[in-house]
Amino acid sequence: MLHQIGLLEYIKQTQKIEMEHLNVIKIYNITKYMALDISARRNLELTERMRDKGKRGTLLWVLDKTSTSMGGRMLRRWINDPLIDINEINGRLDAVKELKSNMMLRGDTIDCLKKIFDIERIARKNFLWKCKCKRYVISKKFSIKTSRAKNCFIKCKNSNA
């Protein structure tokens, strides 16, 4: 807890902005993930080829069928930081199994995800005050209550009932 307070103070001093948008700090626990050094990552060609740094032919290229930028970034993180805990691995596998076996759920989920803006980037730009363009600013016009994402979420949630 003391480390988290220190981290927030450091961010306030270096970034010179308020941190009211930060409500939870999650500590990255290195014991949760398999340690892969740079040589192992390069030789395994997880996200880029050794020869030309391209993506084609890598594990990421084979697996990446994501519908959104957020999903692509998450898949890249999962490939670069493989889990060690068998329960967490099985949890991910169960989620994949459910989507693979339920074509209706999979189709609805894909349709819903395609309608959602890149929330990670919008939030980052909005909270760091680097955004000048109206379409990225999160305001009352683009709240979760009125967005297509909310309507799509309700539709997907109701289709599972």
Image (cartoon, rainbow, N blue to C red):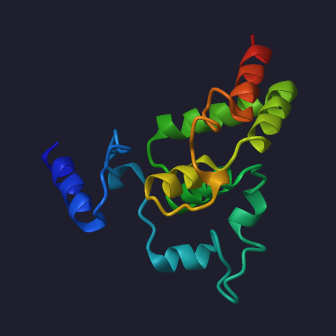
Question: Measured from the top left, where is residue 48 in percent x and y?
Answer: 65, 76
Q: Is residue 117 left or right of residue 119?
A: right
Q: How many marks?
A: 0
Q: Residue at x 71, y 70 (%)?
A: 58
Q: Where does residue 116 sit, x and y in percent of width and height?
A: 71, 42
What residue do we see at 69% from left, 89% from top?
51
Q: Residue furthest bottom?
A: 51
Can see residue 60?
Answer: yes
Residue at image position (30%, 52%) is: 18
Instruction: Give x and y (percent) for residue 22.
Output: 35, 44
Position of the N terminus by quadrant: top left
Name the one closer to the observer, 150 or 130: 130
Q: Name above or below for residue 59 compared with residue 112.
A: below
Q: Is residue 102 above or below residue 137?
A: above
Image quadrant where one finds the C terminus: top right
Q: Residue furthest left?
A: 2
Is 110 left, or right, of 60 in this rendering? right
- Quarter-of-image position of residue 14: bottom left
